[in-house]
C-alpha cells in the first residue's frame, strides 16, 4: 500500500520507527515532513497529508504529533480526509470498519512503542465493507461535506 506520513517536531523519532515498520511490511512510504527538529506548526503537515490522501496521491495517511490531536483536527479540515485519533486496538479497527477513516493519527508523547505498532497494523489490515450497516452513517457525513465544504 502507498502510505503518506507527516508529523511535527515532536514526532521525528517516532516517524523514523513507523517508516521502518511500514517498509518491513512491504508498504511504500511518502514522507511529507517535517524532518527538522525546529518547532513547527502541526496544521501544515496535517493539511499536506490530508490533501495527499483526499487526492488519491496516497491510499492512506499516518499523522503524528505530541498527542495526535492537532494533526487530526488539521487533517479533518480537508474535504475527503477522514482522520481518526487512535489510542486502543478496538477503535483502530473500528476506525476502518465503522468509519472508513483514511488517516490514522497517533501521539508521540502518549502511546508506547508496541501499541503504536499494533494500532498501525490494525488500521492498515482492516477494510471498510461497502454496503455494511455503517454505510448510511459514512454516507451522511460525506453528504454533509459535499453540501457544505468546498
Ligand atoms: C507540541 O507542539 C504539541 O503541542 C503538538 O505536537 C501536538 O501535541 C498538538 O496537538
Image (cartoon, grey):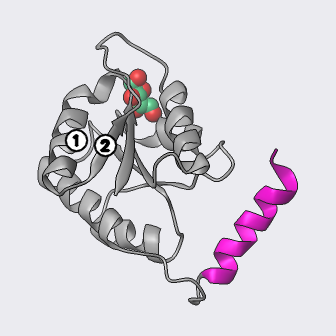
Residue 20: percent from left, percent from top: 15, 42
Camera-side mark, 2 or 1: 2
| Residue 127 visible, this orientation | yes
- The N terminus appears in which quarter of the rendering? bottom left
Up-down relation of residue 83 to residue 75 (above or below): below
* Viewer-nearest residue: 113 or 145: 145
Q: Residue shown at 17%/57% (left/top)?
A: 25
In this picture, residue 78 sits left or right of residue 47: right
Give SS at disc 2. strand
Is 142 included in the stretch rendered in magenta?
yes
- The C terminus appears in which quarter of the rendering? top right
Chief SS of the magenta region: helix
Give SS at disc 1. helix
Within-10-Å neighbours for mark 2: few <14, some 14–19, many 20+: many
Quarter occupied by residue 136: bottom right
Residue 105: percent from left, percent from top: 40, 48
Q: Which residue is mark 2?
A: 29
Q: Residue shown at 21%/50% (left/top)?
A: 22
Up-down relation of residue 77 to residue 124 (above or below): above
Per the rendered image, the range of residues in magenta is 135-150
Q: Which residue is mark 1?
A: 19
Asked if the residue at tag 1 contacts the one at tag 2, i.e. Cβ–Cβ closer than 8 Å, the answer is: yes
Is 5 included in the stretch rendered in magenta?
no
Up-down relation of residue 3 to residue 38 (above or below): below
Amino acid at each position: 500500500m502507498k502510505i503518506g506520513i507527516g508529523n511535527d517536531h515532536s514526532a521525528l523519532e517516532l516517524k523514523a520507527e513507523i517508516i521502518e515498520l511500514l517498509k518491513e511490511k512491504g508498504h511504500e512510504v511518502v514522507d511529507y515532513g517535517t524532518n527538522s527538529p525546529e518547532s513547527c506548526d502541526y496544521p501544515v503537515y496535517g493539511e499536506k497529508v490530508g490533501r495527499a490522501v483526499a487526492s488519491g496521491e496516497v491510499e492512506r495517511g499516518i499523522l503524528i504529533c505530541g498527542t495526535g490531536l492537532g494533526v487530526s483536527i488539521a487533517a479533518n479540515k480537508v474535504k475527503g480526509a477522514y482522520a481518526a485519533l487512535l489510542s486502543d486496538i478496538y477503535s483502530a479497527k473500528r476506525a476502518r470498519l465503522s468509519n472508513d477513516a483514511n488517516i490514522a493519527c497517533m501521539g508521540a508523547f502518549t502511546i508506547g512503542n508496541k501499541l503504536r505498532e499494533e494500532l498501525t497494523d490494525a488500521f492498515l489490515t482492516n477494510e471498510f465493507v461497502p454496503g455494511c450497516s455503517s454505510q448510511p452513517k459514512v454516507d451522511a457525513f460525506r453528504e454533509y461535506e459535499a453540501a457544505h465544504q468546498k
